[in-house]
Image: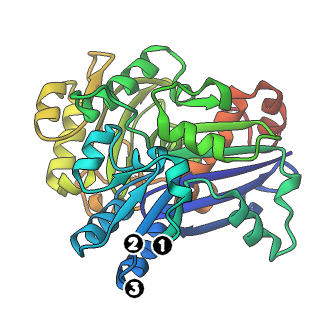
């Protein structure tokens, strides 16, 4: 069995081709620029040429591409976007229009021959297939597709997207499904998770697909590191380019978590948050007031800080920390943590894959 796992982040998209007939360390993999970084570069090229721009496609990750779009408008050029593409910038299209973006229908977009057209997309299967084909690998032979993206969700107008995101996290955890509860088969993705749905439905429809949130995927993948898996109690943090999410785990169960913006964290503030998570003194409202997403304590018994594992591209934020963090490297590669989390989630979401996956990498 083969699983194509694609973890779409802000800086990179990390790609793993898992094959149950190979040792995990021999899995084919790539770390390439993220879709939002590639689109931002393309937008800047259009801006430099002084052309108007039309964005079509689906809702995708913002950040770099949104900043490039704002710069395009500031340069005095017109920017058109179809509704789904426009929701990349804000779920409220009135807010998108207030930015200066001209939201147009698909029919109207077809008449804009003078604007340079760029397509928004998180899961670019054709490009991945071409890259693998260069090395004689046919992705059409893959049995299962899996994709991870970070999704705030479509919050109601006037409602904080940070609160909406964290309430979604809390709801998934309280369902009792554990980290794999953040993964869904394509037809089970909640309607409010618009970016996750867009990524999943951009993929070929001829094979099963699992979609998952990036941060829980990375933490689940970190558990594939034998040192992490062997702990009865641990705090595991994914320090991503934009967001940091930390889970307190005891006996395989989630006992607490918090999520914050990485850019607002110093080593000292992150150490303090991890200590408060362990001591069960972390306040959801206080963290939200500091522009984080939130915190949730499920077990009031204090946890140990003896073993803190970290993964993610900005894990150096804890370099030299007194917490002595363990750098999780599932099958020898930290950048593949999210992909390994996706593979493990497939065994839960698609029961027919469990035997093959567990036969290759052991039980979860």
Name the element at disc 1.
loop
| Alpha carbon separation for disc pair 3 and 2 | 9 Å
Name the element at disc 3.
loop
Marker disc for residue 52 = 2
Q: Residue at x 39, y 85 (%)?
A: 49
Q: What residue is shown with label 1?
A: 114
| Vertical side of 156 occupied by 105: above or below | below
User: Percent from the top left, x then y, of residue 67?
Assistant: 30, 64
In which image quadrant can residue 90 be found? top left
Callout 3–callout 2 Cβ contact below 8 Å:
no
User: Percent from the top left, x then y, of residue 17?
Assistant: 74, 57
| Vertical side of 17 occupied by 280: above or below | above
User: Percent from the top left, x then y, of residue 219?
Assistant: 48, 42
- Frontmost residue, 146 versus 282: 146
Q: Of discs 1 and 2, which sits in the foreground?
A: 1
Callout 1–callout 2 Cβ contact below 8 Å:
yes
Q: Is residue 28 left or right of residue 93?
A: right
Q: How is the image coloured?
A: rainbow
Q: What residue is shown with label 3?
A: 49
Q: Residue at x 33, y 65 (%)?
A: 69
- Frontmost residue, 26 versus 71: 71
Q: Is residue 143 left or right of residue 114?
A: right
* Residue farthest to the front, as pictured: 111
């Amino acid at each position: 069995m083969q699983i194509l796992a694609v973890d779409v982040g802000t800086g990179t998209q990390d790609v793993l081709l898992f094959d149950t007939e190979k040792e995990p360390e021999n899995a084919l993999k790539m770390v390439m620029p993220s879709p939002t970084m590639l689109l931002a570069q393309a937008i800047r090229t259009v801006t430099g040429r002084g052309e108007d721009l039309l964005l079509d496609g689906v809702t995708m990750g913002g950040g770099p591409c949104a900043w490039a779009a704002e710069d395009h408008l500031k340069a005095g050029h017109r920017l058109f976007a179809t509704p789904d593409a426009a929701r990349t910038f804000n779920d409220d299209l009135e807010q998108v229009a207030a930015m200066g973006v001209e939201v147009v229908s698909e029919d109207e977009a077809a008449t804009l021959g003078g604007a340079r057209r760029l397509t928004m997309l998180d899961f670019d299967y054709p490009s991945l297939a071409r890259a693998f084909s260069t090395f004689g690998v046919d992705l059409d032979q893959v049995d299962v597709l899996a994709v991870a993206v970070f999704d705030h969700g479509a919050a109601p107008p006037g409602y904080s997207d940070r609160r909406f995101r964290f309430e979604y996290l809390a709801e998934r955890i309280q369902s009792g499904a554990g980290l794999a509860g953040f993964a869904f088969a394509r037809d089970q993705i909640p309607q409010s998770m618009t970016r996750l749905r867009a990524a999943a439905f951009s993929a070929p429809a001829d094979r099963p697909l699992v979609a998952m949130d990036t941060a829980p995927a990375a933490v689940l993948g970190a558990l594939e590191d034998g040192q992490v898996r062997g702990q009865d109690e641990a705090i595991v943090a994914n320090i991503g380019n934009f967001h940091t999410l930390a889970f307190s785990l005891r006996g395989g169960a989630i006992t607490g978590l918090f999520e914050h913006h990485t850019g607002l964290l110093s080593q000292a503030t992150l150490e303090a948050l991890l200590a408060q998570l362990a001591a069960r003194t972390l306040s959801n409202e206080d963290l939200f007031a500091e522009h984080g997403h939130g915190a949730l304590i499920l077990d009031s018994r204090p946890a140990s800080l003896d073993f803190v594992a970290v993964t993610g591209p900005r894990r150096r934020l804890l370099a030299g920390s007194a917490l002595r963090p363990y750098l999780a490297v599932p099958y020898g590669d930290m950048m593949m943590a999210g992909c390994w989390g996706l593979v493990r989630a497939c065994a839960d979401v698609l029961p027919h894959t469990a035997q093959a996956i567990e036969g290759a990498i052991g039980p979860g």
